[in-house]
Image: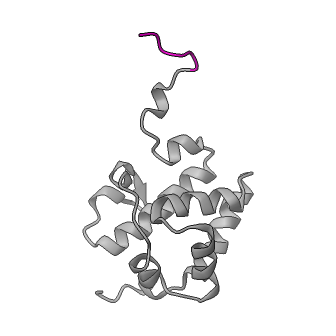
Amino acid sequence: MDGHRVFRMSFASIHPLYVQKAEKKGRSRAEVDEVIRWLTGYDEAGLEEAIDDGRDLATFFANAPAMNPNVELITGVVCGVRVEQIDDPLMQQIRYMDKLVDELARGKRMSSILRSPGAATVSAAPRSR
């Protein structure tokens, strides 16, 4: 770890800021937690434990059960930097989380935020063979 101050910030200090940002735009804590769980593989109990034990972001991501295999589908700009071009893996993971919460707060559909395969092409009508 090359000493970025953000790596040493506690997840417990960041999480309420994410929730506040989402709630200001009419979204919920449950939705914030859902996108974080999607990204990291934490279950509900694991996410609560990460908040309660005060682990830093480096530890939060190091202990993540499994980063989502669709993480490479997260693209765009956070803090003026394209997330897909960040070289440091930990910084990239943190920015992915920031990006997902930003999308949630901007009102994107959850299926789009969670990069559901074919979300844009899903049809309500059953397919015929």
Quadrant of the rendered image containing residue 89: bottom left
Instruction: Give whichever of 96, 33 is nearer the camera.
Output: 33
Q: Position of residue 14 (x, y in %)?
A: 58, 76
Instruction: Give whichever of 57, 65 is nearer the camera.
Output: 65
Residue at x 42% of width, y 76% of height: 61
Position of residue 45 relative to residue 72, above or below, is below
Q: Which residues are magenta?
A: 124-129
Position of residue 50 relative to residue 21, above or below, is below
Of helix, strand and loop, which mostly describes the magenta segment? loop
Q: Position of residue 109 (x, y in %)?
A: 59, 41
Residue at x 39% of width, y 68% of height: 93
Quadrant of the rendered image containing residue 44: bottom right
Q: Position of residue 9 (x, y in %)?
A: 51, 85
Position of residue 33 relative to residue 26, above or below, is below
Q: Position of residue 119 (x, y in %)?
A: 48, 34
Residue at x 46% of width, y 66% of height: 40
For the C terminus, give its image quadrant: top left
Left or right: residue 92 compared with residue 21? left
